[in-house]
Amino acid sequence: GCKREAPTPQGERVGMKSVPDDSRANNMTLRDLLKTGADELGLSLSVEQLNSVFIYLTELKKWNQKINLTAIREERDIVIKHVLDSLSYVKGFNPGMGLTLLDMGSGAGFPALPIKIVQPEIAVTMVESVKKKAAFLRHIIRTLKISGTYVVDKRTEELPNSYRSSYEVVTARAFADMNSAIASGAPFLKPGGLMVLSRGPEEIIAEQELEKYGMILVRKIDMTLPHSDYKRAIWIFKKLD
């Protein structure tokens, strides 16, 4: 937790209310919650990056009234369970200039958009077959003037062959289980590429499933999301050469 006095809630400028007083939040504004949470994950967010995240969340709130983008509606929970959870994926790979990332089933843009906001040098492709959700993603890319980010409104299995073996990192949040995420994502990884998943810490993955797709488990990082008791694990799989 963070005990200092909360500064003025700048988050209000972009239409997000400041966090209600609650023992765990220690009077933090949403902006503080995000900034200190990112610090805990080893990411130092600039004022511009914080602004971008809150513009994104404000748009998410507006669109959520028309199309169902997220079941989580409480602003504090959105910051922790969506944004900070998305940022935790960065523990799984080294973002470098020109790194290519494919996000399967992007939905409202988690984890791909928060990752892109904090690591602007990477190239991101978001795959989202629901047309309205894909339209929302394009709207955010335009609104925030994000470059090097593409939206493909197809199902992952409908992607053309040119996408295969093309990406250094594949991420996914929308899959019911890890086996199906690996089965879907492995074909798109370059040899030596990584699949990074944020899942429950107690999940298991069958060795023979991994072998079938030429993948190995490199690391599992157990963690609790900042400002919460929400336990997650970052699973990092590598595609063998």
Image: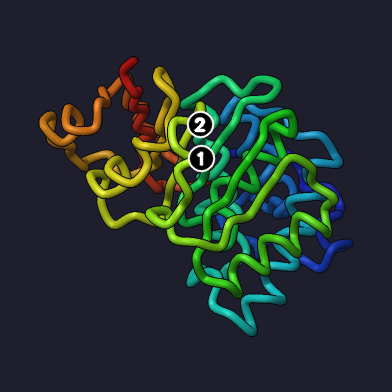
| Residue hosting label 1 | 162
Indicate the amino acid at tag 2: Ser
User: In what quadrant of the picture does the C terminus appear?
Assistant: top left
Please give the name of the residue rendered at 63% of the width and 49% of the height, measured from the top-left corner.
26
| Residue 47 seen by the camera | yes
Q: Is residue 58 above or below residue 24?
A: below
Q: Is residue 225 above or below residue 100?
A: below
Kind of element beneath mark 2? loop
Instruction: Kindly identify the residue that appears in the image at 34 percent across and 44 percent down.
Output: 199
Check the image and report above or below for 75 versus 96: below
Question: For mark 2, does the 10 Å Cα neighbourhood hold few (<14), some (14 to 19), or many (20 or more) residues?
Answer: some
Mark number, residue 102: none
Q: Where residue 133 sits: x, y (%)?
A: 59, 69
Residue at 54 percent of width and 47 percent of height: 111
Label 1 residue SS: helix
Q: Quadrant of residue 234?
A: top left
**Residue under the point 75% across and 64% down:** 139
The front one of 111 and 210 is 210
Q: Read off the residue under disc 2.
A: 166
Residue 94, image quadrant: top right
Tell me the amino acid under the disc marked 1. Answer: Ser
- The label nearer to you, 1 versus 2, is 1
Q: Are marks 1 and 2 in contact (CB under 8 Å)?
A: yes
Q: Nearer the viewer, residue 104 or 230?
A: 104
- Quadrant of the rendering where the N terminus is positioned: top right
In the rendering, at what x and y percent does residue 86 appear?
54, 44
